[in-house]
Amino acid sequence: MLAICLGCQTLNVGTGGTLVQDIWTEVYGKAFVEDVIPLGRDNWHTNPWRKLRPDDKAILSYMIHPIQLGEKSKFCGEMRFKPSDHPSIMSSHHQAVLKLGKGLTVAATSLDGKVVEAIEHAKFRNVLGTQFHPEFPVIWDTAPKYKFTPGDKDLFAVNGYLKAHPPSLEFEKALWTWFFGKLK
């Protein structure tokens, strides 16, 4: 089972866990979208500029940011990444795991360790929940059409961005290879 975003949250709550209802206010103590910008892109989890400038369709509504992989996670075990690898992922969430549900372990966090980005089940090894979005088709888009902020001069392609930040694209491929391998 691959539980993505709301699926990850549902997996956690369904096993008795709880959620942070709003990352920016509860985790980072920011009351306004404008206050989130100084946190830096690694801590946005969704793009605040898109909320401030909804008219600018070139601003990516999602966020691309690196994560910290758990040393004993299936990312490092079965998928062969190292904890020192920090793949960038696509995210678009304002909620996250707070208290883990029964039998769940943290598989990845934000770089600062404050936001759970992936969970897995200790007993049922084929269960993985990702707070991020490996299913977004834009990951494979090679056309430069996006920017992170209104001030960015050059547009980028998500696929090109991930390639330029290894092992990000390799991580996306490995995740799907793992999942489809389990389906077989």
Image (cartoon, rainbow, N blue to C red):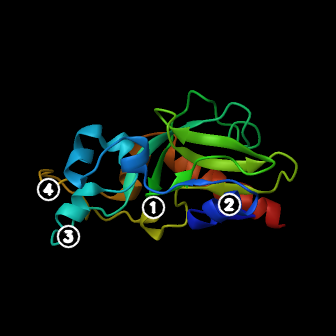
Query: From this viewpoint, which residue is outermost toward the top?
Result: 84
Gap between marks 3 and 1 measured at Cα? 21 Å
Work out how far the residue at label 1 is from the one at label 2, CA to CA, in angstroms: 28 Å
Q: Which tag, 3 or 2, sits closer to the chain's start? A: 2
The three-letter code of the residue at mark 4 reads Pro
The residue under the point 45% across, 41% down is: 66
* Camera-side residue of 98 and 150: 98
Q: Can you tell which quarter of the image residue 38 is in?
A: top left
Mark 3 to mark 2: distance in Å? 32 Å
Label pair 3/1, CB-CB below 8 angstroms: no
Residue 150: numbered disc: 4
Q: Which residue is mark 2?
A: 13
For residue 54, the mark is 3
Contact between labelled residues 2 and 3, with CB atoms less than 8 Å apart: no
Task: Tell us which disc is closer to us: 4 or 1.
Answer: 4
Asked if the residues shown at circle 4 and circle 2 are in contact, with their CB atoms under 8 angstroms apart, the answer is: no
- Work out whether mark 4 precedes mark 1 in sequence or the reverse, and give the earlier one: 1
- Amino acid residing under circle 2: Val
Give the vertical position of 83 relative to 155 (above or below): above
**Badge 3 element:** loop
- Looking at the rendered structure, the kind of residue marked 3 is Pro
Q: Determine which quarter of the picture holds residue 91.
A: bottom left
Q: Are marks 4 and 1 in contact (CB under 8 Å)?
A: no
